[in-house]
Image (cartoon, rainbow, N blue to C red):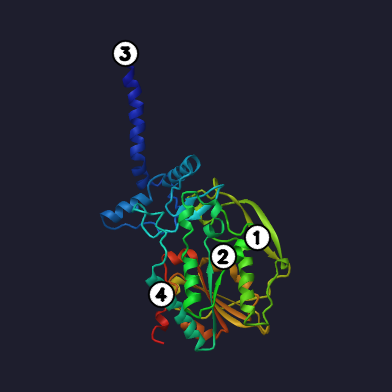
Amino acid sequence: MKNTNVGVKLPLCLVFLIIIFLPLANGFFRFVPEEQLPEKREPEQKGGIQQYTRYYNDRFFFRGPLIRFHNKISCQWFNVSGVPKVIIGKDGWLFQARKNEEPGTPGYFPSIQPFTPRQLEEWGRLVEQRRRWLAQRGIDYLLILVPDKSAIYPEFLPDSLRPFYRRSRLTQLVKYLKKNSDVPVLDLGDTLSAAKKDVLLYCKTDSHWNLYGACIAAGAIINRISERFPNIEPPALSDFELRVRRKRKGGNLAIMLSLQRSLFREDWVGMRPRVPFRAEKAPPPPVKNVRTVKGETFQRTGSGLPRAVMFHDSFGVRLKRYLSEHFSRVLFLRDWGFRFHADEVITEAPDIVLDEISEFFLYGAIFDNSPIDND
């Protein structure tokens, strides 16, 4: 009797061998081009044995489609994120994880630790040092604190995480500064919480606010500044037209999952000024530490408005066009090192310095005042 098992096993063996050797063959012949996923990091380069292993892992054949497939199955079937930095919320919402520990260590997600007394004192010292240095030169100062999306929309967090995300370093810092310093602080939490009843303020698939949220925040900032500079006219929502673009690709959190074009698409909210913006871009001054600093300048020549410098993180990007309308000249500096740029402040000679930092960075970053430590 003829053995049919041999006839079945042979094709299976061939398929198995092809699957095993396909990545190696592609490494030599590149019949399928490499696909770079938007992972917010540079691919590993060749080096020692461990580094070469990571290099190979970053370029494994069919890596991109496999990662997307894994993330899609994890999100769709199990409601679990395939990326530690992304939390899968309710109704298609994504949140950025606040983490103090590395993935895999005990208490990774629950480790939403409040400030220690020593940490609060250090933050208070650094912020007060900036205010004092500016005051000695006749320059006003305003610290602007931006709440996480989870603070404004906690109802869309997973139920298991909501108790942890009620602990807020932002609230701690605001209370500490108001009690122990003369630093002017603007906490945007109340303004945004009140405004969320009308229109969506943060993107569902991105960690940032949308243009409507940025417009609301800019209005609160200008309102606060106008108390000190009466010639600044606060903006009105009626100056803008709300526009919604349907089912656009998802934002940065969806991109981390590589599912921004499929599973996590969303409507993007925009704001169009009814009268064109009058502030024009101008060349920014030379900035030190160019690799980690992005500078952008806007000005309204002859407007008679005050001058400003604004240090900001990624939330400040969508504030620029709204805020620049209310200054004769404003220099925006985005520095991933959160340094105080004393030379640029002296060059610009502003009437006020705005310091914007989002709640997320209170869990890892800290202000760097080394340029003014000796002053």
Q: Which residue matches tag 4?
A: 121
Q: Which of 109 and 367 is in front in this view?
A: 109
Q: Which of 118 and 76 is in front in this view?
A: 118
N-terminal of the pair, mark 4 or mark 1, is 4
Q: What is the crowding at mark 4: few (fewer than 14 residues within 10 Å), some, or many (at least 20)?
A: some
Q: Which residue is drawn at 66% across and 54% down?
A: 245
Marks 1 and 2, how far apart at CA: 21 Å
- Labels 1, 3: front one: 1
N-terminal of the pair, mark 1 or mark 2, is 2
Q: Which residue is drawn at 46% across and 80% down?
A: 128
Residue 189, disc:
2
Marks 2 and 4, how far apart at CA: 23 Å
Q: Which residue matches tag 3?
A: 2
N-terminal of the pair, mark 2 or mark 4, is 4
- Labels 4, 3: front one: 4
State the SS at label 1: strand
N-terminal of the pair, mark 2 or mark 3, is 3
Residue 270, disc:
1
Q: Where is residue 328 in the image (x, y as percent from the top left)?
A: 63, 81
Q: Residue at x 69, y 64 (%)?
A: 272
Marks 4 and 3, how far apart at CA: 84 Å
State the SS at label 3: loop
State the SS at label 4: helix
The quadrant of the picture occupied by the C terminus is bottom left
N-terminal of the pair, mark 4 or mark 3, is 3
Q: Which amino acid does label 4 sit on?
A: Glu
Q: Nearer the viewer, residue 252 or 93?
A: 93
Q: Position of residue 182 (x, y in %)?
A: 50, 81
Q: What residue type is labelled 3?
A: Lys
Q: What is the crowding at mark 3: few (fewer than 14 residues within 10 Å), some, or many (at least 20)?
A: few
Q: Do the residues labelled 2 and 4 touch (CB within 8 Å)?
A: no
